[in-house]
Amino acid sequence: MFFRLNPATGQPLYLQLMEQIRHATETGALRDGDQLPGIRTLAEQLVVSPNTVVRAYTELEKEGLLELRQGSGAYVTLSSRTRRRTDRIQAARRRLQDLIADLRSEGLSDEEIRRAVEAEILYSAELTGKR
């Protein structure tokens, strides 16, 4: 699989794994019904305790993103709410791709685009009081 954990970030490893699984569903890399690696297999690949994988899978099951089947494994299960969110994220990514292409054609570098986007996110968060 394509998950990578970084202990140096200070963020718990199970949260990193949860975020990466969520991201994979949001981008379409993981689809409804896809099977995730078994707990021991993924723990060995990531060089973490099986408890780390169990915790991530269990939390994602509580969120409705995974279905754990005894003896069979973990499967992606996109509820209608999750599917709508995934569709919105994918639509937003397509809009961002178009915007980035336009900004590049206007001569902006990727670093300039990244800084502008980050600045706007921070600015709008300050305006709305969200972070």
Image: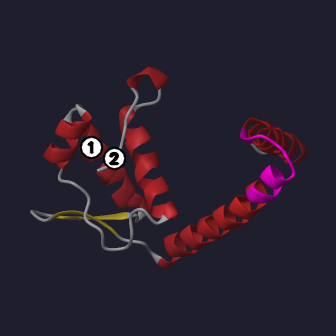
Q: Residues within 10 Å of mark 1 (few under 14, many from 20)?
A: many
What segment is highlighted magenta in the picture? 101-110
Q: Residue at x 25, y 65 (%)?
A: 35
Q: Which mark is residue 56?
A: 2
Q: Kindly indicate the quadrant of the structure image that contains residue 25.
A: bottom left
Instruction: Using the image, determine if residue 32 lies above or below residue 112.
Output: below
Say whether residue 103 is magenta: yes
Residue drawn 87% across the image and 41% down it: 123
| Amino acid type, mark 1 | Val
Q: How is the image coloured?
A: secondary structure
Element carrying mark 1: helix
Residue lying at the far top of the rendered structure:
8
Q: Nearer the viewer, residue 34 or 59?
A: 34
**Residue 73 point in image, percent of width and height:** 18, 61
Which class describes the residues within 10 Å of circle 2: few (<14), some (14-19), or many (20+)? some
**Does dot 2 land on a helix, a strand or a loop?**
helix
Give above or below for 109 relative to 59. Answer: above
Q: Is the residue under label 2 in contact with that under label 1 (CB below 8 Å)?
A: yes
The residue indicated by pointer 1 is 53
Whether 76 is among the magenta residues is no
Q: Residue furthest bottom?
A: 80
The amino acid at mark 2 is Ala
What residue appears at the point 40 percent right and 53 percent down from the top-left corner? 21
Q: Magenta: predominant secondary structure element? A: helix
Whole-percent x and y of residue 2? 34, 48
Q: Residue at x 22, y 31 (%)?
A: 47
How far apart marks 1 and 2 lie (CA) works out to 5 Å
* Rendered location of residue 43, percent (x, y): 21, 39
Q: Is residue 127 left or right of residue 39?
A: right
Where residue 89 is drawn, which disc sits there?
A: none
